[in-house]
Amino acid sequence: MQTARRGHRFANGDEMPLLGLGTWKSAPGDAYRAVKAAIAAGYRHLDCAAIYANEAEIGRALAELFAAGEVRREQLWITSKLWNDMHAPADVLPALRKTLADLQLEYLDLYLVHWPIALAKGVLAPRSAADLIPLSELPLAQTWAAMEPAVELGLTRHLGVSNFSAAKLQALHAGARVKPEVNQVELHPYLQQPELLASCRALGVHVTAYSPLGSGDRPGGLKAADEPVLLGDPVIVDIAGRQGVSAAQMLIAWALQRGTSVIPKSIDPGRMRENLAATALTLSDEDIQRIAGLERRRRYLDGKFWIAGGVYSLAGLWDE
């Protein structure tokens, strides 16, 4: 067994392994099996979310692993996320407690605001403007203020955000009593976001990369007919071939070498082991420069699904 030991150390001494297992898009039953296989392979970082609708089966897997003595809770880093329909201050802690109950845990290591978008309670995805709440009515600062007590109550050790632009993160950070410590965003060679990375580092906010392999298995409704396939990019394939590794391993190594954590999703034990082995790879300066030239500002998860009735816009979402 190979264990990924490289991690990001937080101010309180906690360390988050830089390679984690993503659990989005795992079909019923797959997440249970994937978590067991990942822990056996050496993973110690799991990325979860209430909206993925699989936290209960992940919790069952964790409970069995703990009971069997295969891993201890304190050896794991477990992240989850607050969904958009629970942004009202009165709903934040109940949402977190529901996640903890589903995961069969007493605490999370990290709890994130999933998107800077507010939905009406009970709405999982907007169909019309009535399903969306403008941030002018339910500001992110109010949601964040309701999350802060979760740290003092011992329900989570750290707080952060996901899909936040530099401007939104800076505004939230400036007014926060408990500062956000992580921003989880889409990052890969087609969307490298150097300005956002620099802004996060200036604030002392760690960055986690999601969709690091191009999210080719996401639902068809989120895909464009002519979208580029990152894993098939000639530059990526060439660099991987010269290293004697897969394109996926090379992309993971690139993300790690940038200082970000990375959470590729897999349900295949062999792929999990390959991904874990990528922590030992090093890219040359020439490789890094070649990959820098692949920038397309191409989002695979572009946020168009939030644009209903003009309440939100893509320009306002990403501040671009």
Image (spheres, rainbow, N blue to C red):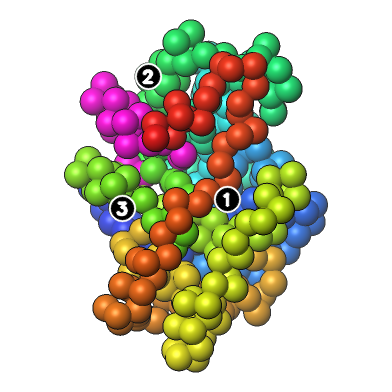
154 left or right of 229?
left
Q: Earlier in the sequence, mark 2 or mark 1?
A: 2
The residue tagged with tag 1: helix, strand or loop?
A: loop
- Reply above or below: 91 against 302: above
Residue 177 shown in magenta: yes
Residue 298: image x %, image y %? 50, 52
- The nearer-to-camera label among 2 and 1 is 1
Dividing the picture into quadrants, the one containing residue 180 is: top left
Answer yes or no: is residue 60 visible: no
> Which disc is residue 141 wearing?
2
Q: Earlier in the sequence, mark 2 or mark 3?
A: 2
Dividing the picture into quadrants, the one containing residue 318 is: top left
Dividing the picture into quadrants, the one containing residue 189 is: bottom left
Q: Amino acid at mark 3?
A: Pro
Residue 190: image x %, image y %? 47, 59
The residue tagged with tag 2: helix, strand or loop?
A: helix
Highlighted range, magenta: 162-182
Q: Residue at x 58, y 17 (%)?
A: 310
